[in-house]
Image (spheres, rainbow, N blue to C red):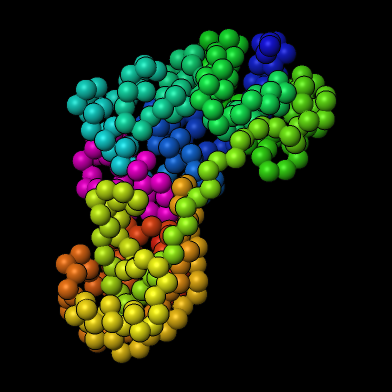
Amino acid sequence: MLKQDQFVTPLLAWYDKNKREMVWRDRGNAYYTWISEIMLQQTRIEAAKDYFVRFTEELPDIQSLANVPQERLLKLWEGLGYYNRVRNIQKAAVRIVKEYGGRLPADYEKLKELPGIGNYTAGAVASIAYDLPVPAVDGNVLRVYTRIMEDDSDILKQSVKTKVEKEFLKVMPGSRSGTFNQALMELGAMICVPNGAPKCGVCPVAEYCQARVHGTVLNLPVKKKRQERRKEEKTVLVLRDGERVAIRKRPAKGLLAGMYELPNLEGYLSEEEILAWVENQDLIPLQIVPLIDAKHIFSHVEWDMKGYLIRVAALEESADPKMIFAEISEVEKEYPIPAAFQAYAEQIQMRLGQDKYR
């Protein structure tokens, strides 16, 4: 069992001295906490900082987030991936404006009722922004707990996460709940690190860590193997007529919904099949050049891609009404393109995501 004097006190003292400076930290702004936590779910802190600054400069509050056109919202999120998260952010913002006057509720259970906000994010907002005594258990926190307690339960199970939440709730300091949660996250990110040996020599709670005592640190946490990703083969087409490139909008539902993409076809097509498809689009192909192979991994599917650059006679319009022909600079500015097409965008010096700002 965790003990407050043995675990909490040294952890908070370490955090107060060693915490990293972050643009969203110590601002007392529930909106900033919410947006930063959603961004950080699948993004390194260093990469998220610039995204966060641009996002909150353009959308400084929940009202502006609720009102922004979705294409602009997706463009601001371009490169962060997991686009359903930002769609849910906007859905939640609309509800917050309607039901709570544009302010995130200072209530853990009400936060969990909002789209895209689960136990962890609700706990982070409630504790960090409002200092409510509720846990915020993410991967870093699970790793710290399982090593401290030498617990070999499968951390992918919700029942295990619930157990850990209850254990931390027992020792959470009432007046510094948000600080305690951030200290746990920071300990997991900086000291009790994933994918390598933890820095036990400088860990503030090392003497109470059962995994360190018994030499089992690298065996924990336990994650049972997930189902293998489905693989899909695709042929990606970079259609050019001088400076313009063809893009098209993806369906409103499903993977990468509402984003724009380089035209692509299922399976690996021969050059003859590709040229026939291009002609069926009422376009006149002039040249076809093979490009590099590329791969992109989503949570449940993997795209294995072969690409071709196809130069065509002047692009006007095609048989596909969803196809758009635009200058590369216009695409960079206006159209959200997922990182899945990064390798082919680079072939035509089209910058996506963070690259646009470098």
User: Looking at this rendering, what residue extends furthest in the right direction?
Assistant: 214
Q: Nearer the viewer, residue 24 or 107?
A: 107
Counting from the top left corner in percent of width and height, residue 47 is at 51, 49
Can you say whether 341 is above or below 205 in the image?
Answer: below
Q: Nearer the viewer, residue 128 or 314?
A: 314
Magenta stretch: give its range: 58-85
Total number of numbered discs in the rendering? 0
Q: Is residue 284 magenta?
A: no
Q: Residue shown at 28%/86% (left/top)?
A: 285
Asked if one can make out residue 221 in the rendered structure from this viewpoint, the answer is yes
Q: Residue shown at 25%/72% (left/top)?
A: 326
Can you say whether 298 is above or below 130 in the image?
Answer: below
Q: Quadrant location of residue 238?
A: bottom left
Q: Is residue 62 magenta?
A: yes
Q: Main secondary structure of the magenta part?
A: helix
Q: Nearer the viewer, residue 172 or 281?
A: 281
Can you say whether 152 is above or below 24 in the image?
Answer: above
Counting from the top left corner in percent of width and height, residue 155 is at 59, 29
Q: Residue shown at 40%/32% (left/top)?
A: 34
Q: Nearer the viewer, residue 174 or 142?
A: 142
